Image: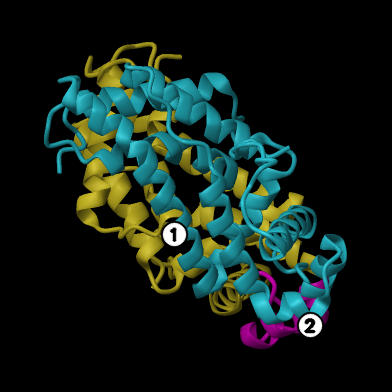
Chain colours: A cyan, B yellow
């Protein structure tokens, strides 16, 4: 189950090249979730995807190239931000999505594997930073809309509000090991909103 | 340079056993910072520490045992919380300490290596969670003191306030890759305080 992704469109455009990429991305995600970055192997991914080994090596070169494209693919497929008309509800929707993703039996290990890889590999780190930059910019639109509605001070750093929603959730998963559930998600969203209302995220 | 640690006491009690542990802990930290968890090797640590290989294997068994004791040692040696009389100043002191640690050329890679190891190793994860539990409990004392002074609502989850200070700093290092400096530290502290004042961390 891929929580932070729209269901694949049956009518997706593109021929064989696009189909090969879809199959390889899914296989790479499965392999990462199962064995981590250290256990990632292009020949194994080719086998899982039922794609020729030479095709995979030619197109993705190595495991870092594969992870970079997987993150780009995940960003492309990620669900759009919500637009409920209430910043509190939008931020809670975002926080709950992050919690569901990190608790998901496939996506959770996948994210952990890529974050771990990024601690020791500069290319993986760059790909990871691009992924979060895209997702933060997407959800920052909720904060822009709230500023336009007069809910927040106009000088608010909109990206920092979105980072503030995610940060406590990742901190629990990666550092403290404290539980992660919907109540924790809502509290992260409400705390970010309270700080933003107090102008703690002024640019 | 070990930023989040007091300087080693010249008069530290303990004989050969304690001296061996000190040498092995320093060597293990150096090796982890240089090569990550995957590159950690007990024979190499023994060589660096100038300690017999069999001593290291007998006492720490494997790399996970070594990392678990390293984290316990780091928690023992960590600096005590501040007590400035102002929660804002105490939280800023905590945030700046975390930033200095994560930006430190030795401690930064060391923490990243252990966090990466914890994503794929249950024993390393448990040791990491214990480390943060100890540090969070230590600094939560600042929040308890602020509640006693009447600065914050009595029902505040004191540990959650401390997690909220650290979380945006770790999120930048591990996920988004955004820069980490003293201004970011102060903003993390001020945002956590603003949210706490708005009772967003009610138990």
Residue at the spot x=25%, y=58% of the render? B181
**B59 horizontally vs A169: left or right:** right
Above or below — where is B55 with respect to A106?
below
Q: Which one is in front, B78 or B113? A: B113
* Span highlighted in magenta in the image: B37-57
Q: Relative to A98, is A44 above or below?
A: below
Chain of the residue under label 2: B
Is B46 colored magenta in this rendering? yes
Q: Label 2 to label 1, Cα distance in Å?
A: 41 Å
Name which residue lies at 32% across and 17% down.
A85
Residue B17 visible in the snapshot: yes
Quadrant of the image containing the C terminus of chain A = top left
Q: Nearer the viewer, residue A172 or B154?
A: A172
Identify the residue shown where x is 18% and y is 36%: A156
Looking at the picture, tell me which residue is in the foreground, A8 or A136. Answer: A8
Find residue B53 and name its label: 2
Question: What residue is pinned by disc 1?
Answer: A129
List x then y, in percent, for residue B180. 30, 58
Choose between B3 and A129: the one closer to the eye: A129
Q: Main secondary structure of the magenta part?
A: helix
Q: What residue lies at 50% left-to-right and 42% top-to-bottom? A: A171
């Amino acid at each position: 189950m891929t929580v932070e992704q729209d269901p694949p469109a049956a009518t997706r455009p593109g021929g064989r090249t696009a189909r090969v990429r879809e199959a390889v991305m899914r296989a790479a995600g499965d392999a990462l979730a199962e064995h981590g970055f250290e256990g990632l192997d292009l020949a194994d991914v080719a086998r899982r995807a039922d794609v020729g080994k030479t095709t995979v090596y030619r197109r993705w070169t190595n495991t870092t190239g594969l992870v970079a494209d997987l993150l780009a693919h995940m960003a492309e497929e990620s669900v759009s931000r919500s637009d409920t008309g209430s910043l509190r509800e939008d931020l809670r929707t975002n926080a709950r999505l992050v919690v569901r993703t990190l608790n998901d039996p496939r996506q959770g290990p996948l994210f952990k594997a890529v974050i771990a890889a990024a601690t020791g590999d500069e290319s993986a780190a760059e790909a990871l930073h691009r992924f979060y930059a895209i997702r933060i910019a997407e959800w920052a639109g909720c904060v822009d809309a709230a500023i336009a509605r007069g809910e927040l001070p106009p000088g608010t750093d909109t990206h920092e509000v979105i980072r503030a929603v995610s940060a406590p959730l990742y901190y629990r998963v990666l550092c403290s090991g404290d539980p992660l559930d919907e109540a924790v998600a809502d509290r992260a969203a409400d705390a970010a909103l309270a700080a933003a209302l107090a102008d703690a995220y002024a640019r």
